[in-house]
């Protein structure tokens, strides 16, 4: 997630620190702002309400610890060890993962891979637009990219 010299992950360390500070200061307010952005919908949508509910069921200290672990992790050095065929499915507009990350994965994985960028918003398109995601998943399930 963290930008680097030759890598665009989407976040600078200062932005991640602000995210962590917001979670720590007022978890409820953070969820209310984060959920619509992550899902790609407004607060009135069922998908956003459901995602918000699941976040509110997590203790704030645990949610912060998980967020730190996720956002500060860097698995780029071991991508070449992944040799199984990978289907990389990406939203066009993902708050957390820019399209450049899917291309980076495709280029640096150790095995065959294929990228499909869906015309969808949010990090959780399976919630916000299942009508787009389901056909894509089915197509990839039936498409063997192994050589």
Image (spheres, rainbow, N blue to C red):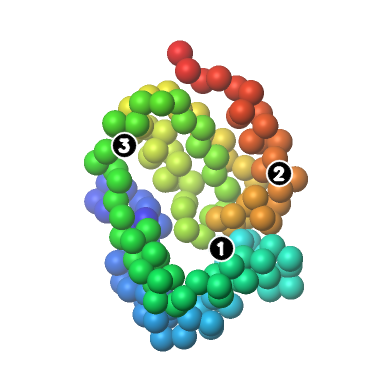
Q: Residues within 10 Å of mark 2 (few under 14, many from 20)?
A: some
Residue 132: numbered disc = 2
Residue 9 drawn above or below residue 102: below
The percent position of residue 102, horizontal first and vertical second, equals 45, 41
Residue of label 1 = 38
In the image, 67: left or right of 143?
A: left
Disc 2 from disc 1: Cα separation: 17 Å
Disc 1 from disc 3: Cα separation: 25 Å
Residue of label 3 = 79
Residue 121 drawn above or below residue 131: below
Q: Residue at x 61, y 61 (%)?
A: 39
In the image, 130: left or right of 141?
A: right
Q: Earlier in the sequence, mark 2 or mark 3?
A: 3
Q: Residue at x 55, y 20 (%)?
A: 144
Residue 4 drawn above or below residue 23: above
Q: Quadrant of residue 69?
A: bottom left
What secondary structure is marked by label 3?
helix
Disc 2 from disc 3: Cα separation: 28 Å
Q: Residue furthest bottom?
A: 25
The percent position of residue 74, horizontal first and vertical second, equals 29, 51
- Are the residues tagged 2 and 1 within 8 Å (C-beta)? no
What secondary structure is marked by label 1?
helix
Residue 147 drawn above or below residue 68: above
What secondary structure is marked by label 2?
helix
Residue 35 seen in this snapshot: no
The percent position of residue 50, horizontal first and vertical second, equals 67, 66
Q: Residues within 10 Å of mark 3 (few under 14, many from 20)?
A: some
Which quadrant does the N terminus fall into?
Answer: bottom left
Q: Residue furthest top?
A: 147
């Amino acid at each position: 997630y963290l930008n680097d010299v030759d890598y665009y992950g989407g976040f600078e360390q200062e932005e991640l620190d602000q995210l962590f500070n917001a979670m720590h200061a007022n978890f409820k307010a953070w969820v209310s702002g984060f959920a619509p952005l992550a899902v790609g919908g407004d607060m009135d949508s069922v998908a956003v309400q459901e995602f918000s509910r699941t976040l509110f069921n997590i203790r704030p200290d645990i949610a912060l610890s998980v967020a730190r672990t996720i956002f500060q992790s860097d698995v780029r050095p071991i991508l070449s060890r992944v040799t199984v065929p990978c289907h990389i499915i990406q939203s066009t507009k993902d708050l957390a993962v820019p399209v450049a990350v899917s291309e980076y994965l495709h280029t640096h994985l150790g095995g065959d891979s294929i990228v499909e960028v869906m015309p969808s918003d949010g990090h959780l398109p399976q919630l916000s637009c299942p009508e787009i995601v389901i056909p894509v998943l089915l197509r990839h399930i039936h498409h063997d990219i192994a050589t």
